Image: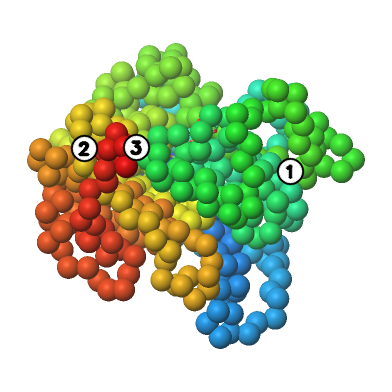
Amino acid sequence: MSAYDYDLFVIGAGSGGVRGARMAAATGARVGIAEGRRVGGTCVLRGCVPKKLLVYAAHFAHDFADAAAYGWRLRPPTHEWAQLIQAKNTETDRLNGIYIRLLQNAGVTIHDGYAKFIDAHTLDVGGSRITAERILIASGGHPVIPAIPGAEHAITSDEALDLLSRPERIVIVGAGYIAVEFAGIFAGLGSDVKLLVRSKLLRGFDADVVRELGQALERAGIEMVVGAEPAAIAQGTNGYTVTMQTGETIETDLVMFAAGRDPNIKGMGLEEIGVDLKGGKAIKVDAFSKTSVDNIYAVGDVTDRMALTPVAIHEAMCFVDTVYKGKPRKPNYQFVPTAVFSDPPIGTVGLTEEDAIAKYGEVDVYTARFRPMKHTLTGRDHVTFMKLIVDPDSDQVLGCHMIGEDAAEIAQGLGIAMKAGATKADFDATIGIHPTAAEEFVTMREKRAPPQAAAAE
Ligand code: NAP
């Protein structure tokens, strides 16, 4: 019998922590888990899931208008924000219950409270001392709040999902995943949205896709204030005034920070027990998710590797295989498909053109840009754009990018092809499904002219 209370203690019951705890318990390990908020974590309760429900809600705005072109006659619809939030809460409560039951059924003991290290094997959780042979930190992250005067007036994505009413005007600070997703939600539901873009929209995404998104946001009436960084927020009688570093001001009903996320490490006592940090912010781990302390591991957003739920789950599974199943497995970050649920959505797998050129020198690029078939009748000026990046030497597809309806659903299948090492010839040999947008990925035959040739035309 081990001298410890648990074989494994997990800090944080989000996607990575719950999966790690359940899978370790299934091998016979005695497992405990601490959660300071609610079991389920960011993705389930304050991120991906509730956000997507709100994205669905916003899309109905287009659908009602488009239906007229297909013969439907509807009275002008109205939207009840409070009802949407209530319905979303019912669903996240249901998921919270499912996650609690998953842990209980797996034999994992849940401890309510935040965990703090006393030593490498001992934690304080809500005043109780708990010991464990190994500890897995999966405490996730939180929204960054820029340190500017009046920052306390602004909300983050956490509060945006629980607003009692929808603001008529909103200023969103940031231009990453969260900013563009919430811009689409609020604009779709009727708010006037201004996006403060400090440097560029969706930094790190393929430049052509970003350009298309910028045009789509403009068409949707979302104003992008480029080069804007807020210096202060002041409350007035009729909302808030955001003052930029340039001195310019914007009046609004609500300010939302979507300015990145930082790992949750505060108050955990990590440095005191010798857990090394990366840039003082994230937990440093080796290729097997082990920290600088031999019995302590970390997965998910707290490690700042790739802040995506399915990646945290993959890291947790690799940890269990390595430590509890005797099958060492490193997380694999190649060809991780990802989506941005902007309006229109983006789906992407593999390298951007810029990164592919940096790595491979010359690359072949294939693109398609068209109006989706649905909008031939509606006349809506939506555009779908697709792009393939190919290594001319090996013919391997290095990157697939899409912006347009169903991009997220399509990117998942492309991810399988790319994981299997698909070449452009494999794409060409695949029969398309007609009529779909996805078939364009297997019918692109014309290489885009290199920039110098295009310029000469
Ligand atoms: P992000 O992608 O890191 O983007 C942060 C944005 O905030 C950038 O545009 C940044 O501008 C801007 N910014 C930072 N400080 C600012 C300031 N003081 N003033 C103005 N702008 C400022 O962060 P995020 O959108 O918050 O998302 C966090 C993570 O969550 C992402 O890395 C992503 O992996 C994950 N996530 C994923 C999904 C999904 O899979 N669909 C959805 C949501 C979130 P600069 O470019 O100038 O730095």
Mark 2 and mark 1: Cα distance apart in space: 45 Å
Q: Residue furthest left?
A: 394
Q: Residue at x 32, y 69 (%)?
A: 436
The percent position of residue 47, horizontal first and vertical second, equals 51, 48
Counting labels gives 3
Q: Which residue is mark 1?
A: 254
Q: Are marks 2 and 1 in contact (CB under 8 Å)?
A: no
Q: Residue at x 34, y 65 (%)?
A: 437
Q: Amino acid at mark 3?
A: Ala
Mark 2 and mark 3: Cα distance apart in space: 18 Å
- Image quarter where the C terminus lies is top left
The percent position of residue 248, horizontal first and vertical second, equals 75, 28
Q: Residue at x 52, y 49 (%)?
A: 215
Question: Mark number for residue 170?
Answer: none
Q: Residue at x 83, y 35 (%)?
A: 235
Q: Which residue is mark 3?
A: 455
Mark 1 and mark 3: Cα distance apart in space: 45 Å
Q: What is the secondary structure assignment of the residue under circle 3?
A: helix
Dot 3 alpha-carbon crowd within 10 angstroms: few under 14, some 14 to 19, many 20 or more: few
Q: Nearer the viewer, residue 417 or 266?
A: 417
The percent position of residue 410, horizontal first and vertical second, equals 32, 59
Q: Which residue is mark 2?
A: 363
In this rendering, the label closer to the viewer, 1 or 3: 3
Q: Nearer the viewer, residue 30 or 54?
A: 54
Q: Nearer the viewer, residue 25 or 70?
A: 70
Residue 91: tell me if it is visible. no
